[in-house]
Image (tube, rainbow, N blue to C red):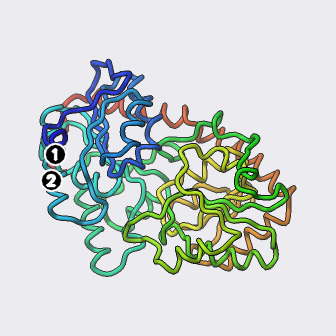
Amino acid sequence: MGEQANGEARNSAAGTGNSGPRMLVGVTHHHTCIVHSARLRALRQAGFSVTLVCGPGEELDRTAKLAGVDCVPVPMQREISLGADLRAFWSIWRLIGRLRPQIVEFATPKAGLLGMTASALRRVPHRVYLLRGLKLETARGFKRRLLAAAEWLTCACAQVVLVNSPSLREAAIAAGIAPAARLQVLDSGSSIGVDVERFSPGDSDVRIRRGISQTAKVIGYVGRLTRDKGLPELVRAFDRILQSVPDAVLLLVGWFDASEDALDLSEVSRIGNNPRIHWVGFQQDTVPWYRAMDVMVLPTLREGFPNVVLEALATGVPVVTTTATGSRDSVLPGITGELVPPGDSDALAVAVTALLADAELRRKMGAAARAWVHEHYRAELVQARVVEFYKELSSRGDSCRNPVT
C-alpha cells in the first residue's frame, strides 16, 4: 500500500521521455490494460507524457513496458465496496495532485467514477471519459438505477465522453446519462483498432496441441466467461449444434470472471464435463487460437465495441454475434458474419450450423471480413484518430476548469 499511498509511478523500461502535455489514463482491472498498449504507445510517440493507473497485476507492468509509459497501481474493485472505493479515490486524488495532468482519460465503470470525480474536483483542465459499454443494460430494479446514477455522475464530471460505437451512443442517450452533445464517436468507432499484420490468416498448431482433428468444425469464443457474455446460451446452442454437426468442437479462450455476472457452479460444471468443449483459460497470444477456428461466436448481451470480433474478422474468421448494443456494429450481416437476437440460443445454433455446413460461404465471409477491418479498423487508423483528438483537445489551453459540467 505504500506505493499507492505515495502515488509513486513505476517507470517503464523505455520511460516516457516526453515533455509534452501530461496525461493520466485509468482503467479498473489489470487485464483491461492488454487492449490499451498500442493506444498508449501512440499517445507517447505523439509527444504526450503518459501515466497509466489501474489495479495491480502483471498486465499493468507488462502493458506499461510495451507502451513505454509510467504506471501506478491502485487497487480497485469492480463491485461496490465503500471502504476500498474510498481508499482508491484517495489514491487517485493524491496522484492527480502530484502529477498535475493537463488531460485525464478514465475508462471502465469503477475507474471512470472514481477517476472522473477526483479529476473534476481537482479541476483538471481536460477530462475525458471513455465509455466502452453500459453495465446497466443487463441490470434491473434498484441496481440499474444505481448504475445509471453512477454513469450520470461520471459523464457529468467529463467534458467529453468518447463512445466506442454508434449504437452505444444511442443507448447512452436513451438511458439519459449524458446530453447528446457531450457524447462523441471517433469516425467508425472502436478505441484501439486491430493490428492486421499480427491478426492475419495463417498456420496454427492449436489443433495438434489440443488433440482436435484437422477435419473437426471448431467454434471459438474469446473473452470473459460470464452470463453477460452469453455463455449459458452458447453452451445450450452447442448442444443443439452437436445434433447436426457431431464432430463440432467448442473452444473457449478466456477466464471464469468472479464478477456479479459470474457463471453459477452448474454452468461451470456443464462446461467442464463436456468432452467436446475445450476450455483453455486466459491466453496472452490469441492469434493461433483464432486461426484454429472455423467460426467465432460472441453471444453477448451488451458490449461497447467488441475487440475480439474485430480480431477474429482480421484473421479471416466469420463471426456470429448478437444485435445487442455495440456488437451489432461489429459485423456486416450476410457479408462478414451473422447477427442473432441476444439470449436466443436456438437462433445462435441455427446461424452457426449454417456456416459450419458451407465452407465456401465461410471462405467468402472471411475474405470480406479481413478487407472490411483493413479499410475501417486498422490500428494505425484508429490510433491516428485518437492522437488527433487529443492534440486538438490539448491545444484549447486551460479554459475548461469547471469542476462539474
- Which of the labelled discs sits on residue 176, or is there none? none
Percent across and percent down for residue 139 are 37, 75
Q: Residue at x 66, y 74 (%)?
A: 274
Specify whether 235 is left or right of 52. Answer: right
- Which of the labelled discs sits on residue 91, or is there none? 1
The quadrant where residue 252 appears? bottom right
Q: Quadrant of the N terminus?
A: top left
Q: Residue at x 26, y 61 (%)?
A: 152
Q: Residue at x 18, y 42 (%)?
A: 4
Q: Measure the alpha-carbon separation of dots 1 and 2.
A: 6 Å
Any part of residue 279 in sight: yes
Q: Secondary structure at mark 1?
A: helix
Relative vertical location of residue 29 with respect to residue 59 in this rendering, above or below? below
Q: Secondary structure at mark 2?
A: helix
Percent across and percent down for residue 393 are 32, 33
The quadrant where residue 359 appears? bottom right
Kind of residue sitting beneath label 2: Arg
Specify whether 404 is left or right of 34. Answer: left
Any part of residue 155 in sight: no
Asked if marks 1 and 2 touch (Cβ < 8 Å), the reply is yes
Percent across and percent down for residue 270 are 58, 77
The crowd level at tag 2 (other Cα within 10 Å; few <14, some 14-19, many 20+) is: some
Viewer-side residue, 222 vs 276: 276
- Which of the labelled discs sits on residue 87, or is there none? 2
Specify whether 303 is left or right of 117. Answer: right
Kind of residue sitting beneath label 1: Ser
The crowd level at tag 1 (other Cα within 10 Å; few <14, some 14-19, many 20+) is: many
